[in-house]
Each structure stands twice: as C-alpha cells, then as structure tokens.
Amino acid sequence: MPELPEVETVRRGLEPVMVGRRILRAEVRRPDLRWPLPERMAERLGGARVRALGRRSKYLLADLDTGETLLVHLGMSGRMTISLPEGAERMPGVFALGHPPVGKHDHVVLHMEGGARITYNDARRFGAMDLFPTGQTHPLLAGLGPEPLGNSFDGAALARGLAGRTMPIKAAMLDQRIVAGLGNIYVCEALWHAGIHPARRAGRIARPRIERLVQAIREVLGEAIEAGGSSLRDHRQASGEMGYFQMNFKAYGRAGAPCPRPGCGGTIRRITQAGRSTFYCAACQR
DNA sequence: GCTGTAACCTGTCGGC
DNA sequence: TGCCGACAGGTTACAG
C-alpha cells in the first residue's frame, strides 16, 4: 500500500477532525489484524483527547491525553476515511456528507467529538494498530532508518547505510532500516530519476550517484505528497478522494512503454527482484 | 550477519 | 458467464 506519501496524505486529512478533539467512542469490529489489537483498545481510546497526530515512516502516531499513543499501520490495503453526519458543517478535506453503511472490512470505527466518524478499513488485514506509552519507542519504530524528507537523511547517511551491502540497490532501498518509508513504487521511480540500475550492488555505488539518489528520493516523495499520493487499487485520501501522482509515474507499471527520458529511446522493462516487480529502463539506468 | 524467499489475507483482473 | 491463476502498495520469519 500506502508508502510514505500516501500515509502523509492521510495524516493531513485526519488532522482537522482529530487533533484537539475527543474520541467519544471507539468501535472494534474485528480484533485480528496483522496482530491482535491491544487489550481493551475500545475502552482505552474512548474519551481520550487527541493531542497531536504525527507520522514516522509509514506509521501514523496519535498522541492522546491519557498518556498513550495510538500507532496505526495501513499495511498493503488499509484506508482511514472520514465521514460527517448529514447536515454537518463542511470541513476542509471532507467533501461528502452522510455516514456510509459500515462495510465488511471496516475493522475499527472512531466516533469523534464534532460528529466525524473515522473508519479503518483493511481488506487484506496486513495493517496493525497498537497502544503504547507516549514518549517511549515502540518496538516497530526502534530499528527504523532516517526519514527521507528529514534533515538527517543526506548522501553521507545513505552511503553509511549502503556500505558493504552486496544486495541489489532496489532491495536495499526497501529495507526500512536503511531509509524509512519507501516502498516498491517510489523506489522504482527514484532509481529511474537517478539513472541507477535496480540490480546494481548497493555497496558499490559511487558517492556522486548516491547524492543524486538522495535528491531523487526527496523530489519524488515531495511531488507525490503534493499530488495527494498515488491511487492504484486501494489508496484513498482520508477525504475519500483519489491521489494523482500515478499520472507522473516514469517507470512504475509502464512495462513495454518507451522510456520518458528525453533522448533515451529505451523501453521500460519489468523484472522480479525479491518477489516484487521492478520497473526500469535498461538503456539509461546503469 | 547477510540475503533471498515464502507466507500472511483478500480482491481484482485477464485469459480461457 | 464462470472458473482459475497471477498479482498487488508491506513486513516478518526462516532457511541457506
């Protein structure tokens, strides 16, 4: 699913209906996501006020005034959608009024102060939720590498992460310990922009090309967030709207199409690496 | 310790 | 129209 831009888009959509507001009631309809939901989650969320809504890598983090933080991961197919009751005052980021009927894969529903309803839907149940003491580091966050849009991510940091690695650069960029938040789509896109072949050994990429890759990652992620993420099968913004970055894909999902780099003339190819599809241009990615 | 692969679960799409 | 297999944005466990 959702890679960093999609999760950030969802976070921005949820912020106006969550931050500063109380969760009046939490409804757990199915407790077995990737792991069982935390004990008494509905009781622990009910009545809590959301102090802040942040993001680390692909995880959403809601700090509550109960001293706990709600961690949410959307897995491959998870969605968080907002609905407002009929007749409610319109809010930024929410364009539809009226609560839709609860769906088969709506696993958790948060009834918010102000009338908004936030629904966590995840058909494949690869997603996760947990509660942990605010200020502590959750085990799932402990080993994460630098945020690709943060100040600590630069050529030197990436070079340190790749040093000595014999795995393909594509696999290394998907390793959340090296850089956190990238997934299959944006790794393919960033490697295309940087002109780096996805099968190249990670530890053998020259420093100037690593710098170029860092720049490509920042640009691709930044542009994707501005476009509201990419909507393929499952992703929607919290408002229910689609994202539009898929219109800008240069390599991902374009097997057989001409490489869009001016003057290249190559063709986008699809290969399988570590069981995942990789799209690249063999002519201009070396 | 590092790397590659299978598995988790469900929906969608294309081919026959 | 219906069935079947391939594939899908992530992450973990395990084998080599």
Image (cartoon, coloured by chain):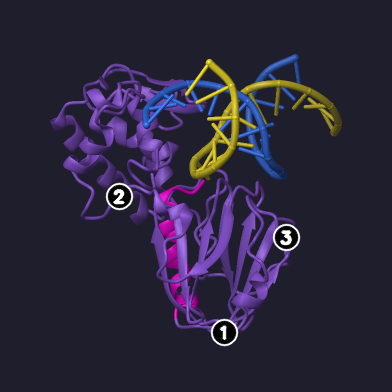
Chain colours: A purple, B blue, C yellow
Q: Where is residue A119 in the image (x, y as percent from the top left)?
A: 62, 66
The kind of residue tagged 2 is: Pro
Asked whether, in this view, residue A191 is left or right of residue A253, the answer is left
Nearer to the camera, A131 or A283: A131
- Which residue matches tag 3? A30
Subunit ID for the residue under disc 1: A
| Element class at badge 1 | loop
- Which residue matches tag 1? A113
Subunit ID for the residue under disc 3: A
Density class for disc 1 (Cα within 10 Å; few <14, some 14-19, many ≥20) is some
The kind of residue tagged 3 is: Arg
Q: Which quadrant of the structure image shows residue A135?
A: bottom left
Q: Residue drawn 27% across and 33% down?
A: A162
Q: Nearer the viewer, mark 1 or mark 2?
A: 2
Q: Distance between the residues labelled 3 and 2?
A: 33 Å
Residue A137 lies, with reference to residue A41, above or below; the image says above
- Which residue matches tag 2? A146
Residue A140 lies, with reference to residue A167, above or below; the image says below
